[in-house]
Amino acid sequence: MKIAFFDTKPYDRPSFERYGEENDIKFKFFETRLNGDTASLAAGCDGVCVFVNDIVDDEVIDKLTSLGVKYIALRCAGFNNVDVRHAFGKIHIVRVPAYSPYAVAEHAMAMLLTSIRRIHKAYIRTRDFNFSLSGMTGFDLHGKTVGVIGTGRIGRAFISICRGFGMRVLAYDKFRAADLEDGENIRYVELDELFENSDIISLHCPLTEETYHIIDEKTLEKCRHGVVILNTSRGALVDAEALLSGIKSRKVGAACLDVYEEESDFFFEDFSGHIVEDDTLARLISMPNVIVTSHQAFLTEEALSNIAETTVKNLVSIERDGRCENELCFRGGEAEDCKTGKCF
Ligand code: NAD
């Protein structure tokens, strides 16, 4: 099988080459992203392998199918960049629903600790032999309340880390998990209660029409003064302009962002020698209480290996059996992994 691999980064290749060779899959690596202009690079390939910022809209899907491409293998969990509805019945889409929830949950906690204990400031100060502590006062996580929106794999891993720190958890999910609440320190609540009573809010839900700008001017108004916002999920969950206003007005105490609404223009690339045109991003980054990482939360050795292994398994399974449990299909109007093998 031949697969066109878009948006290749050096860290992608070793594990994909290894699992590919073991399973007779040849990856053709392209640095460019998949979009309407680059789709033709997939000519002669059975499938394409794409990541979070590749564009898989109706135009791209039609181009791929006209080239005889049969599979779109997402090497990520989220699929908000794919027009799944348009693809249905035309081309198979498989994804990696879980590769290491710990990678993302641990990164969220790393960002939170860095921010509230001013580690990012301390690192720069002591490198310059500045051992002053002024402006470095943080706060304890123990006894604080964290609001967790989305209690799937990553949300639950994050909750478990927070419990290790002695935090109380207010959880919200559209579909509550029966076994999450412990009757004392972890409670499901409605969104308003979560906004009103959380010291820290961490987002772990997918980006959908319902969750788009779940953090905006109105929701920030409901939040506690000094709330810390953590987003390691998808950029458009947060209205970046509203967040910036909240930071300027001191309503938001800190923000830790691994994702950003307009990230596809910048993230994963080196812009250090350029003038960044996005004023909101530039202003956010200039704030002392904002930490931005470049969609890095997934990037651990374990996650990279699991991503490659599952992607290759997905491709082998769909080519051999015509079905794959990680194929996206529709149930009740929403896209989800296939339980029946009747996606097509
Ligand atoms: P998951 O499917 O296991 O969990 C998602 C949870 O969100 C589910 O419990 C679901 O019921 C809930 N949900 C769905 N709609 C909701 C709504 N309207 N309001 C509240 N909750 C809702 O997914 P996961 O593996 O935990 O991943 C969560 C998100 O993390 C992904 O959607 C993806 O966007 C993001 N992610 C980011 C990175 C990164 O590197 N930063 C890596 C992987 C995943």
Image (cartoon, helix red, strand yellow):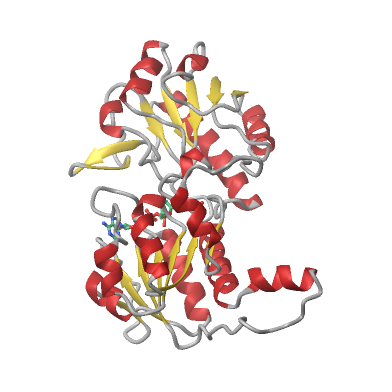
Residue 75 place in picture, x, y as percent: 50, 38
Q: In this view, does 220 lie above or below 273?
A: below
Q: Is residue 237 above or below residue 219?
A: above
Quadrant containing the N terminus in the rendered view: top right
Residue 78 found in image quarter:
top left
Q: Is residue 335 above or below residue 296?
A: above
Residue 319 place in picture, x, y as percent: 45, 24
Count how many numbered circles sit on residues in the image: 0
Question: Does any portion of residue 232 appear in the rendered image?
Answer: yes
Return the residue nearer the eye: 120 or 87.
120
Residue drawn where x is 56% and y is 50% of the image: 294
Residue drawn where x is 57% and y is 42% of the image: 275
Residue 122 found in image quarter:
bottom right
Question: Which quarter of the rendered image does ligand 1 occupy?
Answer: bottom left
In the displayed structure image, the side of residue 249 where residue 210 appears, left or right? left
Return the residue nearer the eye: 74 or 33.
33
In the displayed structure image, the side of residue 167 where residue 184 appears, left or right? left
Residue found at the far right of this picture: 129
Residue 85 place in picture, x, y as percent: 25, 32
Question: Does any portion of residue 178 appear in the rendered image?
Answer: no
Q: In this view, does 269 lie above or below 142?
A: above
Return the residue nearer the eye: 215 or 272.
272
Residue drawn where x is 58% and y is 39% of the image: 308
